[in-house]
């Protein structure tokens, strides 16, 4: 009889333990998502200038000003670092970045512009506006954006990643 009682008790304990673990994991995911939204990004003067120029352009063509989000700039910085480390200029991993931004920020749409080897914010913006696909992103139906500009320490060339989101 004691063996039956002990076995039943152990079974109930295991069931309660499993339920409490799954409950904890969903709380952890919520905390992780909230933490990811609340990152701090330190903007350089050229990043601030580029965002200002993009918003000035948008206003000049009758569009809304975009608000910066540090989380998006962090994703942009990660991509710049990837391009520098791999010596490539590409949109590699864009789908993953976009999905993460959609998940964390509940974005409905995401677009991305990259640039390479422009010395000023104005020259990068001019190049984007001269490219139909990049211009389409700048003029897109977005509400927020982030940007990162990183310099390759070996070559001194700048990498730009500008991500747009509709939230």
Image: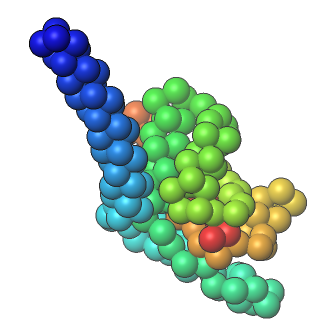
Horizontally, residue 90 falls left or right of residue 29, namely: right
Where's the C terminus, which quadrant?
A: bottom right
Q: Position of residue 48 (x, y in %)?
A: 46, 73
Q: Is residue 126 visible?
A: no
Using the image as rendered, state which of residue 60 and residue 102 is in the foreground: 102
Q: Position of residue 155 (x, y in %)?
A: 46, 36
Q: Residue 35 lies in what quarter of the image? A: bottom left
Rendered residue at 71%/82% (across/down): 57
Nearest the camera: 20 or 122? 20
Q: Is residue 138 above or below residue 113?
A: below
Q: Is residue 70 above or below residue 32?
A: below
In the image, taking residue 5 as reference, residue 132 lies left or right, namely right
Residue at x 70%, y 63% (from the top left corner): 108
Residue 36 image-quadrant placement: bottom left
Q: Position of residue 54 (x, y in %)?
A: 64, 75
- In this picture, residue 33 sits left or right of residue 147: left
């Amino acid at each position: 009889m004691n063996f039956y009682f002990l076995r039943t008790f152990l079974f109930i304990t295991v069931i309660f333990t499993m339920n409490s673990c799954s409950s904890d994991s969903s709380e952890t995911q919520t905390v992780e998502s909230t933490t990811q939204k609340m990152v701090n990004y330190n903007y350089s003067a050229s990043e601030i200038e580029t965002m200002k120029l993009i918003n000035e352009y948008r206003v000049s063509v009758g569009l809304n000003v975009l608000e910066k989000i540090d989380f998006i700039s962090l994703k942009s910085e990660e991509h710049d670092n990837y391009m520098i480390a791999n010596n490539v200029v590409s949109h590699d991993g864009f789908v993953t970045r976009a999905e993460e931004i959609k998940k964390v920020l509940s974005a409905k749409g995401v677009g991305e512009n990259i640039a390479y080897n422009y010395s000023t914010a104005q020259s990068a913006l001019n190049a984007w506006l001269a490219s139909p696909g990049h211009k389409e992103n700048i003029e897109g139906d977005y509400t927020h954006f982030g940007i990162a500009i990183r310099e390759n320490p070996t070559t001194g060339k700048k990498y730009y990643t500008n991500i747009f989101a509709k939230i």
